[in-house]
Image: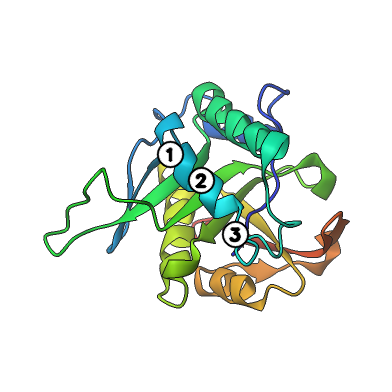
Amino acid sequence: MNDGRHQEPGSRPTGAANQANAGGPNPATVVGTDRLVGTPLSVADRPWLDQLHRDPEVMAYFGGIRVGEAQERWVTNHLRMFEEQGLGAWLFRERNADGIVDPKQLPVGRAALRPMSAEVGVDIMEIGYTVARAGWGRGLATEMAQAMVTLGFEHYGLTELGAIVHVDNAASQRVLAKVGFAAEPTHNVELSEGLHLYFTRVREDQ
């Protein structure tokens, strides 16, 4: 899984964020895949998200569990990001046999489209994705990652996307390869959690 890092909402948007916002469509409120439906993070999702971020295995490559002030900051920032920029986190729930999602059903993961952190030094929109442990090994991360790629290219009209992944997170690196990202080692970056590899994907018509 790739949690990613992001620009703090409320700070000046990057050029990539301006590209996504300027004259663009309304924020995407529903993102669909064959098996999943994603909706923007809401306050009602907080209990599930708190549980996800307390799981040490899920958070192993993201600096450890996220609780207390760190969790509060993450949630507040992402809620504000969607309100101000139409970007942030989407929580994904599985469709039933009829292709419908029960809104009371717990999510299986979350994914994000947001400005890349200034720490990385690349002015670009990034994707991120994290699957709850119960959903591991089913290809859900790939579906969520592809949903973010489609969202960025087709809904927001972006021409390039980036992603960073911890050097030891081989599963997440495979996900990025499946959805068309390629490694760009010149932008690898050492962060507090360790070395992160940089990946990029350019829209096919560019």
Describe residue 19's horizontal placement relative to residue 193 as left or right: left
Cα separation, mark 3 vs mark 2, equals 10 Å
- Residue 30 percent location from the top left of the image: 33, 41
- Which residue has dot 3 on it? 55
Tell me what residue is drawn at x 54 percent, y 57 percent: 129
Mark before the other along the chain sequence, 3 or 2: 2
Amino acid at the residue labelled 2: Leu
Say which residue appears at 85% left-offset and 59% top-offset: 189
Whether residue 186 is situated above or below residue 111 in the rendered picture: below
**Any mark on residue 45, and which?**
1
Alpha carbons under labels 3 and 1: distance apart: 16 Å
Q: Residue drawn 60% across and 63% down?
A: 58
Residue at numbered disc 2: 49
| Side (left or right) of 38 relative to 53 | left
Query: How was the colour assigned to the protein in this rendering?
Result: rainbow
Position of 167 relative to 149 (above/below): below
Tell me if residue 112 can be seen.
no
Q: Amino acid at mark 1?
A: Asp
Element assignment for label 1: helix
Give yes or no for contact between labels 2 and 1 (Cβ–Cβ under 8 Å): yes
x, y (%) of residue 36?
A: 31, 58
**Image quadrant where residue 143 sits:** bottom left
